[in-house]
Amino acid sequence: MPQKTFVVPNIGCNGCVTSIVNELSGLTGVSSVRGDVATKQVSVEWDIPTEWEDIQSALVSIEYPPAEAS
């Protein structure tokens, strides 16, 4: 099962994390979503049929895009 931890710069409060968790949990195949306000990190575990691109698109659609990898 793929897993990824990434930074979402727009996270500013627990409400932001709740929005992200609710949105990503609604994707078929997503089994776990955790977020941390202090570090602005989100961890997601998923399986087929979801792909990383689906997760990115969902985050962009709710205005919480993941930071670009450096």
Image (cartoon, helix red, strand yellow):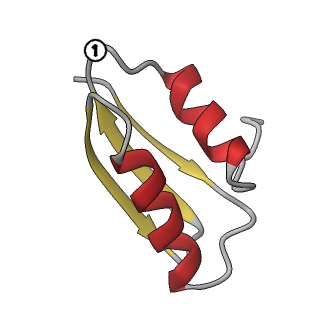
69, 53: nearer the viewer: 53
Residue 32 placement, left or right of 11 = left
Residue 8 placement (x, y as % from top left): 66, 57
**Residue 53 sits above or below residue 9 on the image:** above
Residue 60 placement (x, y as % from top left): 72, 43
The residue at the point 41 percent across, 60 percent down is: 21
**Label 1: element kind:** loop
**Residue 2 sits above or below residue 62 on the image:** above
Q: Which residue is mark 1?
A: 48
Quarter holding the N terminus? Answer: top left
Residue 45 placement, left or right of 40 = left
Q: Residue furthest top?
A: 49
The residue at the point 53 percent across, 25 percent down is: 54
Residue 61 placement (x, y as % from top left): 70, 44
Is any part of residue 5 visible from this angle? yes
Question: What amino acid is labelled 1 in the image?
Answer: Ile
